Amino acid sequence: MQLLEVECLGKPLKLEGSMAGWQQLFWGDQCVSQIDATVSANQSGDSGSFAHQFLLQSEQGDIRVELSGVLHWQPFELQFKLLVNDELVDENKLVEKDIEQRQVDPSQKQPIKFSFIGMAGLGLKLFKSAKVIKVLFAAGSLAAYSWLFSIEFAIALILCLVFHEYGHIKAMKYFGLKTKGIYLIPFVGGLALSDEKINTRWQDIVISIMGPFFGLILSVACLVGYWITDLEILAGLAVFNALLNLFNMLPVLPLDGGHVLKSIAFSINSRVGIIACGLGAALGVYISYQFGLALLGFLLAIGSVEIFFEYKRRHLSDLLPLNRYAQIVSIIWYVLTIGGLSAIIWLVGQTDNEALSLPLKILNS
């Protein structure tokens, strides 16, 4: 990931690095210094000093440039000094907020990252009118779900999907990311797309978990409405929406829960990341086989490719890892969201209505 960008002798000086100790320094588009990755470097988040030096030739003679400093990953802090011919020209300290608020240069080449959302976003760019595509996809989803269930259930399901995706959109806007809106995909669900790339694992956590968290809020509101009015349709909306969002919290890529797991695990180190994601994929295979979920099997195939590319580029990650505090907060938030959704399914499942108790029977099985 890009750690630093400062002006140096008329060109941008960019420092890129990873938790494994790998660093590259670019002056303009030219790599002028490199530090190789090591097995032990910075894996525990310990601070480490670094120094880059290079020479530039000019008519007045050689110009010696030195960039040195101390890097601390967890919590992130970068102190640096830039010297030109032993004269201090820049000195500063960067923290996680500076990385999080950084705008990605659109002219800069971005690493290729394979993901389900990325593929869908690329496909959508082929269409001229996004508004027309949104309407067509929404109409297709309504027709598909009406054919499977009923028009009333299809409308309720689409409302749940839109509210879930709105949680993702709200989180993107919170971080200042430009959004492209919500797309409903028949038989798949919905997608919330952004034009910009995230810079930190924390952004990935918040954007991923806010969809199911908004789903939890909707289920709670419907459940309270059911207690007040005794309308069973509200209870049904609460429990099936809870089941939908609970499914999305499975620690399986590319589901939201899989992104939460990936960000937490890869923030510890790449070995933990690949093991955790592999176990999540194994869980997904078991659930897919147990319940005959062909769609989950399809998503697992996409998620497996995403895990492969994530591990392959582990030394070149563009995302700032979570610090210890953020890891703990993410785990608690994840567990509480799952607990809240499960509690709603259990509460509604205590009724005598067979349809309302169906989600609880699914979980019990």
Image (tube, grey):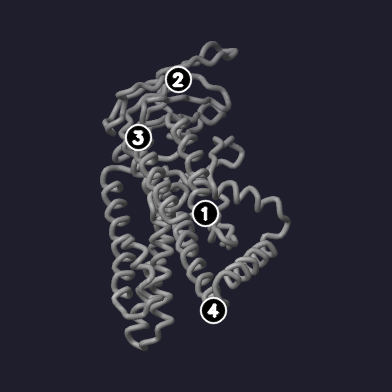
Residue assigned mark 4: 152
> To which quarter of the image does residue 232 belong?
bottom left
Q: Quadrant of the N terminus?
A: top left
Element class at badge 2: strand
**Callout 1 crowding tier (Cα within 10 Å): few <14, some 14–19, many ≥20:** few
Q: Measured from the top left, where is residue 290 in percent x and y?
A: 41, 53
Viewer-side label of 1, 4: 1
* Lower position in the chain sequence, tag 2 or tag 1: 2
Q: Are marks 3 and 2 in contact (CB under 8 Å)?
A: no
**What separation in Å lies between label 4 and label 2 (alpha carbons)?**
61 Å
Eye-nearest disc, 3 or 1: 1
Q: Secondary structure at mark 3?
A: strand
Query: What distance separates the C-alpha of mark 4 from that of mark 3?
Result: 55 Å
- CA distance for labels 2 and 1: 44 Å
Q: Is residue 129 left or right of 223 when viewed as pictured?
A: right
Q: Amino acid at mark 4?
A: Glu
User: Circle 2 is placed at which residue position?
Assistant: 34
Q: Residues within 10 Å of mark 2 (few under 14, many from 20)?
A: some
Residue 276 appears in the figure = yes
Q: Residues within 10 Å of mark 4 (few under 14, many from 20)?
A: few
| Mark 4 or 3, nearer chain start | 3
Name the residue beneath numbered marker 1.
295
Residue 78 numbered tag: 3
Q: Between marks 1 and 4, how big is the CA–CA gap?
A: 23 Å
Q: CA distance from mark 3 to mark 2?
A: 17 Å
The answer to whether marks 4 and 3 mark residues whose Cβ atoms lie closer than 8 Å is no
Lower position in the chain sequence, tag 1 or tag 4: 4
Question: Looking at numbered disc 3 in the image, what kind of residue is underneath it?
Answer: Leu
Q: Quadrant of residue 151?
A: bottom right
> Is residue 121 placed above or below 343 in the rendered structure?
above
Callout in the foreground (4, 3): 4
Q: Residue at x 38, y 75 (%)?
A: 356
